[in-house]
C-alpha cells in the first residue's frame, strides 16, 4: 500500500509541473494603453511558474532515485508543491481581476481595410470573459438593407488585432457572423444593432503576452485578407 501511495505522490508532483497560470514578479514587459498591466501579469506568472516547475522537477528526480525510503519526503514535496501552486494561481487571479476592473470597457481604435466596403459600423472595447480579457465588438447597420432568403453567409465580418503601424499581431484574427441564416427574408434599418458586446476573440495573453504589449487597435478586413493571414 505504501508503494502505491509513493508512486501516486510522484504522479501528483508530475501533474503539478504541467499546471500553468500567476503574478507579475519577474516580468519586464511594459504596460499597454488598452490592456494596462495585464500582459506583464500573465508573463510574470509564466516566469514564476517555470521557475517553480524547474525546482520541483529537480527535487522530484532526486527523491525518486531514493526509492520508497523517501516516501515521507515525496509526500511532503507533493503537499508543498500543491500549496505553492495554489498560492501562485490565487495571487494571479486576484491581480488579473483588479487590473481588469481598470481596463474593461476601454474603447479601442477601429479601422477598415482599404479593400473593404463595410456594410456595418463597429465599436470595439476591452471586455472580460470567464476571468480573462477579451475583445468585445458591437456592430450596427450602416444603412437600410435586406437579406434575401438563405443569404446570411454573405454578411460576415472579419477582423485582426494590429499594432500602431497597422501590422497584424501574432495569431490574432476573428470572424463575426452578425446575421444568422434564416429561411425568410430579413430587413434591417440604418443604426440597428446587429450584435452587441460580442466576444470576438481572446487576447490570448497566456501564450502571446509580449506580442500583445504592442496592441493598438482593430482592423476589419476582407475575407481574402483574413484567409491570407
Image (cartoon, rainbow, N blue to C red):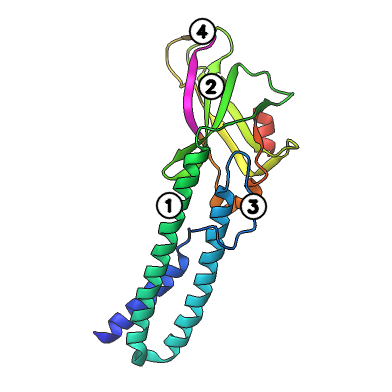
Q: Which mark is residue 189?
A: 4
Q: Which quarter shows the N terminus?
A: bottom left
Q: Are marks 1 and 2 in contact (CB under 8 Å)?
A: no
Q: Are marks 4 and 2 in contact (CB under 8 Å)?
A: no
Q: Are marks 1 and 4 in contact (CB under 8 Å)?
A: no
Q: Quadrant of residue 143?
A: top right
Which element carries disc 4, helix, strand or loop? loop
Q: Position of residue 22 (x, y in %)?
A: 49, 58
| Residue in the image at 53% along x and 65% along y | 48
| Residue in the image at 64% along x and 58% along y | 28
- For label 1, the residue is 94
Which element carries disc 3, helix, strand or loop? helix
Q: Residue furthest left?
A: 1
Marks 1/4: CA–CA distance: 43 Å
Q: Nearer the viewer, mark 1 or mark 2?
A: 1
| Residue in the image at 35% along x and 80% along y | 76
| Residue in the image at 40% along x and 74% along y | 13
Q: Which quarter shows the C terminus?
A: top right
Marks 3/4: CA–CA distance: 42 Å
Q: Earlier in the sequence, mark 1 or mark 4?
A: 1
Q: Earlier in the sequence, mark 1 or mark 2?
A: 1
Amino acid at each position: 500500500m505504501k508503494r502505491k501511495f509513493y508512486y501516486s505522490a510522484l504522479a501528483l508532483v508530475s501533474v503539478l509541473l504541467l499546471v500553468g497560470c500567476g503574478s507579475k514578479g519577474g516580468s519586464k514587459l511594459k504596460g499597454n494603453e488598452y490592456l494596462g498591466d495585464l500582459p506583464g501579469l500573465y508573463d510574470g506568472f509564466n516566469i514564476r511558474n517555470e521557475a517553480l516547475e524547474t525546482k520541483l522537477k529537480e527535487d522530484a528526480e532526486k527523491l525518486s532515485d531514493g526509492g520508497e525510503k523517501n516516501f515521507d519526503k515525496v509526500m511532503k514535496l507533493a503537499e508543498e508543491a500543491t500549496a505553492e501552486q495554489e498560492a501562485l494561481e490565487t495571487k494571479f487571479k486576484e491581480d488579473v481581476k483588479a487590473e481588469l476592473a481598470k481596463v474593461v470597457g476601454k474603447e479601442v481604435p477601429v479601422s477598415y481595410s482599404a479593400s473593404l466596403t463595410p456594410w456595418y459600423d463597429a465599436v470595439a472595447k476591452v471586455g472580460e470573459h470567464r476571468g480573462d480579457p477579451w475583445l468585445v465588438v458591437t456592430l450596427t447597420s450602416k444603412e437600410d438593407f435586406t437579406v434575401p432568403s438563405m443569404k446570411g453567409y454573405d454578411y460576415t465580418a472579419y477582423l485582426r488585432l494590429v499594432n500602431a503601424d497597422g501590422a497584424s499581431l501574432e495569431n490574432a484574427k476573428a470572424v463575426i457572423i452578425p446575421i444568422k441564416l434564416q429561411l425568410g427574408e430579413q430587413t434591417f434599418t440604418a443604426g440597428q444593432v446587429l450584435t452587441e458586446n460580442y466576444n470576438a476573440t481572446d487576447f490570448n495573453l497566456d501564450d502571446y503576452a509580449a506580442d500583445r504589449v504592442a496592441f493598438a487597435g482593430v482592423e476589419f478586413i476582407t475575407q481574402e485578407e483574413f484567409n491570407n493571414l
